[in-house]
Amino acid sequence: MTSVSNLLIHPIPYDGESAVSFLARLAELNRHSSIERLINKEQRHFLAKSAPNCRLADLPRFKYVLQLLNVDPNHQSLAFAKAGPTSRSARKWSNIELHEDLLKYYPCSYCPQCLEE
């Protein structure tokens, strides 16, 4: 596993911020065009093998992402734990289980009215 040490800015998470939002801010503050640009191809392969059936915001993979980016490991509390072994398993937030369909994994939103136009 190769760490990335070229991130100059390491933001502090906002209270209640999600893992994806934190990674999006980390990317933006360090002038990366997206979250995906923070991690190179070799590291993505490592993440897929080390934490299968997980998204970046899921606790198993998010812990590795923080290690790869040399970011404070205490920020892993931003990530969701999984209630089961599959990628469609509910996510745990505090004592609440959230169904996969309720979660948004991409920081972009589109207004439904704008899409109709």
Image (tube, rainbow, N blue to C red):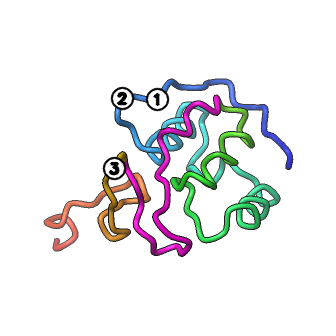
- Mark 2–mark 1 distance (CA, rounded to whole Å): 6 Å
Task: Residue at the far front: name it.
Answer: 95
Residue 15 image point, x, y percent: 36, 29
Q: Which of 13 and 26 is in front in this view?
A: 13
In screen coordinates, is 68 left or right of 80? right
The residue at which mark 2 appears reads as: 15
The kind of residue on which mark 3 rests is Asn
The residue at which mark 3 appears reads as: 95
The residue at which mark 1 appears reads as: 13
Q: Are marks 1 and 3 in contact (CB under 8 Å)?
A: no
Q: Considering only vertical position in the picture, is 73 above or below 46?
A: above
The kind of residue on which mark 1 rests is Pro
Range covered by the magenta-colored residues: 72-93
Circle 3 Cα neighbour tier, 10 Å, few/some/many (<14 / 14–19 / ≥20) = few
Q: Considering only vertical position in the picture, is 69 above or below 58?
A: above
Q: Nearer the viewer, residue 69 or 95?
A: 95
